[in-house]
Amino acid sequence: MRNKVLNITCVFIFLSFWNVSASQTSQIYDGDTINVVDENNMKQGHWIYFGNMKNIPGYSPDQKVEEGSFKNNRKSGAWTKYFADESTKSVIEYINNRPNGAYKIYYENGVIQEQGIWKNNRNIGAFVRKYPNGQVQQAFSFSEGGKRKGVQKYFFPNGQEQIVGEWNEGKEDGPITEYYPNGDVKSVKVFNGGQMDTTQTKHYEPTNEIKAIVVDDIDDSKSAPIIDENDVLLETNKTPKGTKTPLFDGNGPGTLYNKNRHLSQKGNFKNGKLMDGKWYRYDENGLLVSIEIYKNGKYIGEAQIEE
């Protein structure tokens, strides 16, 4: 049973030549005083936002949505957000009303989705992102300036390394090794300050057949992407060769490329949403890091990275 909230309003009236008045409000929750607004109309101390204060669909009026501390109307310390089932959605450290410090973001199944340190609007130090099944998806390290530095790793949902290499000042620097889901080396690409030396690139065939990776504990809430302004239609499967490509209305088979002319989405669409097909994901340097498979508009797993 949720604790009921008792509203208490204390009004202090100060009469003077100028007839000035001020008020202070607070609430009682589980025996503690919360949601204090001082005489200067500033939020202080422990605050809890409830469903009736946030007006978010799926939350009951007395259900906790978010809680943490205020100091002079600014968020300070750890703030926690909750899913509608009351499980933890995120825990983020704040300094002077801005995210600054350690943070964790969770899937609804309780698995940590993302964990790192935030400073000056960017990640620093160690960073980890996981799949819904708990396997690590990305393990990065960032410099104090917020740029990727050192060994960076991408993983398949089965735990196998997918891409491993070193970055410096946010750019690939040295050999970057790509693997097949079975652990075989797929390619080795050599970079210098973000520039690839194609003369040193090596590709390898897998020793065994590679099958699509299907995650047992998939994230059912993860829906296919919607076509946006970064996606450009360059071809459709229904366009006869030698004819002009028609405008794509977001329905039927199609192949989309992003603004860098990299393959973005391919498959069957409905109302601008990928229903059955693949979504190609790239990092900030344009390196293909994963290929997500969708069926009936839902994520079902990942395929091997194609050349």
Image: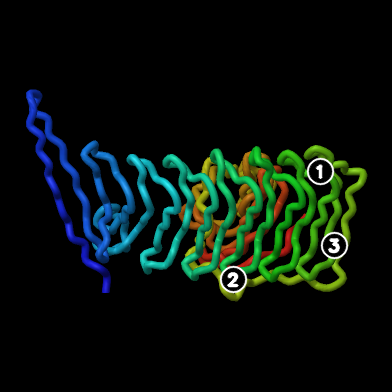
Q: Earlier in the sequence, mark 1 or mark 3?
A: 1
Disc 3, SS: strand
The answer to whether one can see residue 242 in this image is: no
Q: Give me the C-alpha separation between circle 1 and circle 2.
A: 31 Å
Q: Nearer the viewer, residue 221 or 28?
A: 28
Say left or right for 24 vs 236.
left
**Foreground tag (3 vs 2):** 2
Q: Earlier in the sequence, mark 3 or mark 2?
A: 2
**Crowding at label 1, few (<14), some or many (≥20) Cα neighbours within 10 Å?**
many
The numbered disc on residue 173 is 1
Say left or right for 39 vs 304.
left
Q: Which residue is mark 3?
A: 185
Q: Of all residues shown, which one is farthest toward the top? A: 17
Q: Give me the C-alpha separation between circle 1 and circle 3.
A: 19 Å
Q: Which residue is mark 2?
A: 133
**In percent of the image, x 75 and y 63: which residue is there?**
161
Say left or right for 247 vs 203.
left
**In percent of the image, x 85 and y 62: which residue is there?**
185
Question: What amino acid does circle 1 point to?
Answer: Asp
Q: Give me the C-alpha separation between circle 3 and circle 2.
A: 24 Å
Figure quadrant of residue 162 = bottom right
Disc 2, SS: loop
**In percent of the image, x 70 and y 62: which residue is there?**
155
